[in-house]
Amino acid sequence: MKKLYRRFMSVAILSLLVVITLVLVTLNCVNYAKIYKDSYEIIDEIKDNGGKISYEEHNESRYAIRYFTVIVTENTQDVNTSAVHSISKDQALKLTMQKRDEGKSQGVVYIYGNAFLYRISEGKQVTAVFMDITNQLDKAKHQVNMSIVIGILVFFIFVIIFYMFSGLLMRPFIKNYEKQKEFITNASHELKTPLAIISANNEVMEMMSGENEWSKSTHEQIERLNKLISNLISMARFQENQHFVLEGVDSSSIVKQSVEDFIPLANKQEKTLRYDISKNMMVKTDLSSFKEVVHILLDNAIKYCDDGGHIDVSLKKKGRNVIFKVENDYHDLSVDPETFFDRFYREDTSHHQEGYGIGLSMAKSIIEGAGGKIKVHYRKKKISFEVIL
């Protein structure tokens, strides 16, 4: 449940961060867009008014608007810099011609540290209007800084609220989770008794009438159900007591011993189990859990390997990690191999093998719980499980 709680908090906090960021970015982008839109409207008004600001439209703010204009015809050059004393007429004319030659009809140019928005239009004459928007941009930058501070405060306030009420929010999930575990455990134990009776009755029938295909089939199904029940109980216990004791483990000896234990089973099914295990590969993991993972992967590989196929097991050092790899032949995989880790998944449409997909789900939980990673690939008609320790 701690893992579920951490995941919930991570998703909630990340979602909050994304929402706040999007809101702040949107608001500031809208603010900047409005500054440029309003400024270009004033520039167009000045251009349409013959290079002068309209007293009717901007009676109160006309003295606060700093601008200069350049109007060039075939015979005349009219430069007005009366509202900007720091720029000479020659500078204004030169800047206009420079931007015109560069093919930049509008944009922002910085003059003596001030930002001037400009627009140049051509027709019978060249008309250029440059307007100082330094104050507007400074205010916008100040608003950006303030919005960031406010955003950070809001973020931390909501994080505190999440932590305060997370228990209440998670309570239904925890309750359902506990009920699910309780149901699995109780149902598994309750199923054992009727299965034992069915098995005993089946054995009595075999003693009285001899073994036949029906009694044999019944026995096989009982074994499958017993294995399913055992796996369900193991999964429930693992999730209930998900405590790992990390220690230095000689993974080489564990993998080698497990492989040797499975070789007779592979030979019985006319499959070849090969291995390439480096010596003295020490890893920091939980001993019993690692043994369980090795057993699950080997059992799965043999079970789902093609008839007459090969199972290859390797244990190698790669950088700082130890890589445990189990690979088996499988001629036709039609699904995403990542679904193998889904509980109760089984890809057996062509192989008709028994199995309930619980083991791989448990193996993934064990490896990730112990700080490792497990990957699955399907390449060149081979299924490959790779454990990174």
Image (cartoon, rainbow, N blue to C red):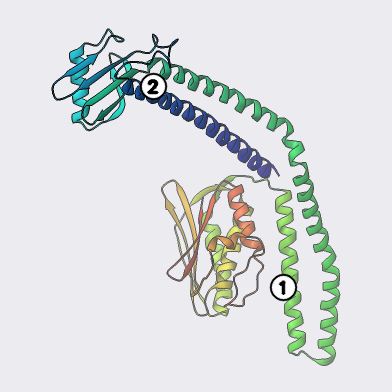
> Number of marks in the image?
2
What crowding class fits label 2: few (fewer than 14 Cα within 10 Å), some (14-19), or many (20 or more)?
some
Q: Looking at the picture, does residue 223 appear above or below residue 99?
A: below
Q: Looking at the picture, does residue 375 appear above or below residue 107?
A: below
Q: Which mark is residue 365?
A: none
Which residue occupies the foreground of this view, 357 or 219? 357
**Where is mark 1, residue-wise?**
224
At x 43% / y 24%, what residue is drawn?
A: 38
Q: Amino acid at mark 1?
A: Arg
Quadrant where the N terminus sits is top right
Residue 83 image offset from top left, x and y in percent: 31, 10
**Where is mark 2, residue-wise?**
42
Residue 293 image offset from top left, x and y in percent: 60, 58
Q: Nearer the viewer, mark 1 or mark 2?
A: 2
Q: Looking at the picture, does residue 349 appear above or below residue 146?
A: below
Q: Earlier in the sequence, mark 1 or mark 2?
A: 2
Residue 278 image offset from top left, x and y in percent: 44, 57
